[in-house]
Image: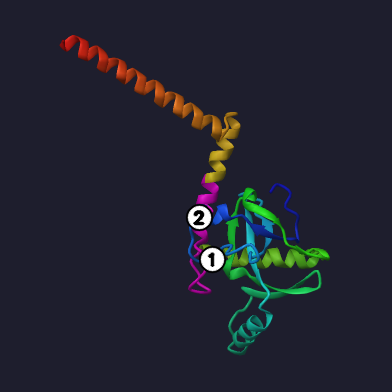
Amino acid sequence: MDNIEKGKLYFVKDEFFAAVEDKFLKVNKEQNYRPHYYAFQDPESGLLWLIPCSSQISKYERIIAAKKQHHKPSNHIQIIAVSGKKQVFLYQDMFPILPKYIMGVYKNIYGEFQIKDPKLLLQIEVNAKKIIKLLRHGVKFTPTQPDINRIEHIMLEEQKDFDLNKGEGISSEKISLQDRIDDAREKSQKNHIKREDFHIER
């Protein structure tokens, strides 16, 4: 999906989970249950970062309250209103992704969910970038958070391959076809040599 708008929530294609194979990602289980995510772009890498959202407000209100009571940081979990509906933003479970793996916008019968307040949008990204730095340095908020360094490497390598092929004007389909042609030519040459060898031996 090319047109990713700031402040909206999105779904992720099954192909992404198959590509990265991280056991701690919340995969799509069935048609009527697909996790949704807040998306923002990293201007340096060009990758998107997704913040998983949850509707289990009471559960996370208790977790946040317990952390504050014990004077522990809780900025890796925030409850934010999106189009008037509370969503839990799980910064602790963020991960990077290429735009092509975004499937569509999260919406209901009243329309798309979106944050429009510029100040809130800025606060979300500032907080997310702080958490990303901690995650990159190996900070563990939960034992079940995805391996973002590994996922980021996979996405950057995939992006690099795409940019290289695009720069050379060669599509992956054409590369695959050319590989098959070269392979067939090589096999043909080998078979020709074998026939000649057989003739000499006779």
Label 2: state its secondary structure: helix
Disc sitting over residue 44 in the figure = none
Q: Is residue 114 magenta?
A: no
Question: Which residue is depicted at the point 57% across and 44% down?
Answer: 159
In contact (CB < 8 Å): disc 2 and disc 1: no
**Bounds of the magenta segment:** 137-157
Q: Is residue 44 visible?
A: no
Label 1: state its secondary structure: helix
Question: Which residue is depicted at the point 63% across and 83% down?
Answer: 59
**Colour scheme of the rendered structure:** rainbow
Residue 196: % across, % down: 25, 12
Most distant residue in the bottom direction = 69
Disc sitting over residue 135 in the figure = 1
Q: CA distance from mark 2 to mark 1?
A: 18 Å
Question: Which residue is depicted at the point 36% across and 19% down?
Answer: 188
Looking at the picture, which amino acid does disc 1 mark? Answer: Leu
Which residue was labeled with disc 2? 20
